[in-house]
Amino acid sequence: MLQILYLAQDLADPAVRRRTLTLVAGGARVTLAGFRRGANPLAAVHGIEPIELGTTADARFAQRIGAVAGACLRLANRLRHVQRPDVIIARNLEMLAVARRAVALFGGDVPIVYECLDIHRLLLRKDMVGRALRAAEAQLGRDVRWLITSSPAFIEHYFRPLSGINAPPILLENKVLDIDGTAANVAGAAECPPAGVPWKIGWFGALRCRKSLSLLAEFSRMMEGRFEVVLRGRPAYSEFEDFDGALRSEPFMRFEGAYRNPEDLADIYGDVHFTWAIDFFEEGQNSAWLLPNRLYEGCRHGRIPIAMKGTETARFLAVRGIGLVLEEADAESLAALVGSMTPDAYADNAERISRCNPGTWVFDRSDCEALVRRLATLIVEPPRPLPAVAIAEPRHNEGGSL
């Protein structure tokens, strides 16, 4: 059985849970280790007790660097009972540093796979800070065997022209994990609401975009109750002045808390008509290039995605002839796009989604197994057995810097 050490930047991230479930469903034995960034019991994976390396915080890059340095110094102790892995997957740049330290502890020849599903704005800066971070990424990733990313635009706009990572890229889109391979847990058919009942727009997942919150609030008030906006997921409180207060003051918006992915998707998408597949968090950069989880989730459950013109999401929808594209980022344009939606127009949009191959949206057990088999091709046989107890405590003069 393939032994994978999965190093995650945020153990409370639902996407980390989903990747862990993917690897386990594919037949791997996974050791999960990483940093804690807030509490989220719904991100727990049954049967896997993560190894906590420390605590980090959103929007505090310097603090995260310090936490990574400390984790590298303490890593021998944290991993003392861990069996030598066949592969290490490092999610995000800071975990590459931890992965390199782990490789040294395990004998120096464990292959590393770099998983990068967002391009942080600091990496895109043209000044000394950006150049230094890209140089650090290139240095830490010089021996990386594969690069896992989730959108072709990340490769086109960052990894190919700017990044020093030379590893072959593997595209793993943010599809819905469907281990059982059945359609039993799919939302009911998308239908327009009865007379007098509002249309609902669902904004689910990582809630970090102040501009989206402001735009949807203005739009919902403009519609005077004909539209409601439902938010679910994990708010990035550091990005909002007062997220909870803002929602309390909005008559046609509500926040319904976190949810389990994929277990709760049918219920939450079954409650809405449209999926807000727009993100302005890093406008013109990461937000323009990503293909968000909610794009696949909403379409999997037949809900109509709304994308922003000029983004990779809009291009994805155009290729398939589905969804709605917002021309301008303002409430008036959104009202023109969906405000006069008719039952026939809605049914036509839903029907076009239903004609897409289900594999467009779903990552099933066979996909999980194929991924693990592919990872197994990276296995490097150790020159000699290295039991977990062979990892010694670091001496006081041992290195551990980034």
Image: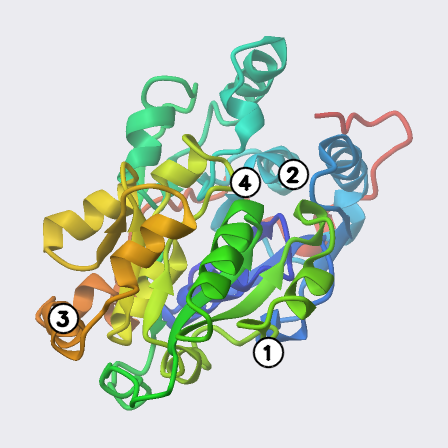
Horizontal and vertical percent position of residue 125: 53, 18
Residue 5 visible in the picture: no
Determine which of the numbered discs, if any, sits on residue 92 in the image. Answer: 4
Q: Which residue type carries mark 4?
A: Asn
Task: Label 1, secondary structure: give it.
Answer: loop
Q: Is residue 96 above or below residue 296?
A: above
Which quadrant of the rendered structure holds the N terminus?
A: bottom left
Pointer 4 or 2: first along the chain: 4
Nearer the camera: disc 3 or disc 4: 3
Pointer 3 or 2: first along the chain: 2
> What residue would you read off at disc 1?
47
Pointer 1 or 4: first along the chain: 1
Q: Residue at position x 41%, y 30% from top?
A: 284
Q: Residues within 10 Å of mark 4 (few under 14, many from 20)?
A: many
The image quadrant that residue 45 belongs to is bottom right
- In the visual, does 380 lie left or right of 85? left
> What residue would you read off at disc 3?
345
Dot 3 and dot 4 residues touching (CB under 8 Å): no
311 or 129, which lies in front?
311
356 or 55, which lies in front?
356
Q: Residues within 10 Å of mark 2 (few under 14, many from 20)?
A: many
> What residue would you read off at disc 2?
98
Q: Residues within 10 Å of mark 3 (few under 14, many from 20)?
A: few
Tell me how far mark 1 sits from mark 4, CA to CA: 24 Å
Pointer 3 or 4: first along the chain: 4
